[in-house]
Amino acid sequence: MPTSMMTAAYITGLGPADRIRLGPLLVPTPGPTDVLVAVETVAVNPVDAYIRSGRYRTPIPMPFIVGRDLAGTVALTGPGVTGFQPGDRVWCNSLGHQGRQGAFAEYAVVPADRLYRVPEGVDPQTAVAVAHPAATAYLGWYVHARLRPGETVFVGGGGGNVGTAAIQIAVAGGAHVIASARPEDHPRCRAAGAEAVLDYRDPRLAERLRELAPAGVDVMWDTSGYQDFAVAAEATAPGGRIPVTAARAEVAVPLSRLYTRDVAVLGFVISRASVADLAAAAVLINRMLADRRLTTRIADRLPLAETADAHRRIESGEVRGRLLLLP
Ligand SMILES: NC(=O)c1ccc[n+]([C@@H]2O[C@H](COP(=O)([O-])OP(=O)(O)OC[C@H]3O[C@@H](n4cnc5c(N)ncnc54)[C@H](OP(=O)(O)O)[C@@H]3O)[C@@H](O)[C@H]2O)c1
């Protein structure tokens, strides 16, 4: 049984990263259908900083423990939980929003239907590192863009966290992938399964894309948030889909080229995903983790005490890969 106090990274009000405190809070008590997890690794996402600052508004309790993703070990289960036992290795990617307390603490309460096993032989740090980008990729391809085997897709920002997972999951689904990335990330995109990789800074990118996919791509997903809609509208085949999951700036959208060609623009955030869709994503993620088909880049591993710094680094936009923290 855990002791009554734990160390947590938390805020008492929305604001900049400096507001994150490290200190003792009560170990939470699991409800009837909850699991108490002894947290071993957490991963920082850009959205953690959006929630902490108030840029993405969602109901949260105060004091609020930041963060949404964890890997750890089951410490205790509520009386109504049948699927987990103390000692099970588990991961979760949906704490810290919609009224749920966050993950960055020694212990976290997770509703049992939001908790998944770490497959045998898989490093829990890899599981928590891929969880958020890979679940986003699953939702983008299957819940929103309705990807079909044999389709040709474009993944912008293929060297990034979401981009690399998007390539891996599209390839696993039988799609042909063209990606864009900075040249040093081209081998990474190819290793993920992309058949062709373009330099996103190439001024002739649209032309090269047309050469590679003369009939247009079926799905055009720029995961970076720097989508050029003039290029996207031309490069997407009639009946194609354009998922939107980030926006670094408000941009002009050539509506007439979209609606006259039955092209759908599909915005979504993982924070709104249903428990069922997240669970379906977890099934695919676990299968691909077990097969070593989902890989990621770990930028750094830090102690929990450095959560505020981790948020500052994520906000600087300079982190390449995943930042993990170890309570
Ligand atoms: N809607 C959702 O549910 C959801 C879920 C997860 C993430 N997101 C958002 O998705 C965005 C990406 O997240 P991430 O974790 O994948 O970030 P990331 O790892 O930083 O990846 C971004 C990638 O985009 C590349 N890039 C930079 N400028 C580009 C350009 N002009 N064209 C094409 N690619 C460019 C970057 O390359 P360099 O390394 O060369 O700069 C980097 O590889 C963030 O804004 C995040 O908040 C949204």
Image: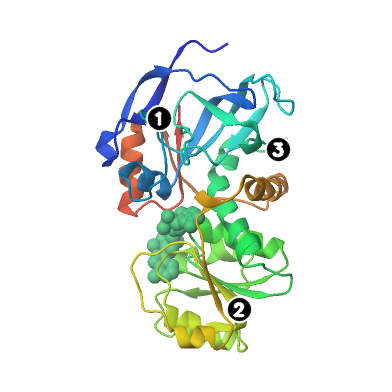
Label 1 vs label 2, nearer the camera: 2
Against 73, residue 133 (above or below) is below
Q: Viewer-nearest of labels 2 and 3? A: 2
Q: Please indicate whether residue 77 sits to the left or right of residue 58 in the image.
A: right
Q: Identify which residue is drawn at 57% across, 25% down.
A: 37
Tell me the residue at 60%/64% (across/down).
144
Q: Which residue is mark 2?
A: 240
Q: Is residue 157 above or below residue 116?
A: below
Classify 10 Å Cα crowding around label 2: few (below 14), some (14-19), many (20 and above). many
Image quarter for ligand 1: bottom left
Tell me the number on the disc at residue 303.
Answer: 1
Q: Please indicate, yes or no, whether residue 191 appears anywhere in the rendered image.
A: no
Kindly check if marks 2 and 3 are in contact, taking CB atoms under 8 A apart as contact.
no
Q: Which residue is mark 3?
A: 119
Horizontal arrangement in the rendering, residue 257 relative to residue 212 (left or right): left
**Residue 17: percent from the left, percent from the top?**
28, 40
Q: Quadrant of residue 19?
A: top left
> Which amino acid type is marked by label 2?
Gly
* The C terminus - image quarter: top left
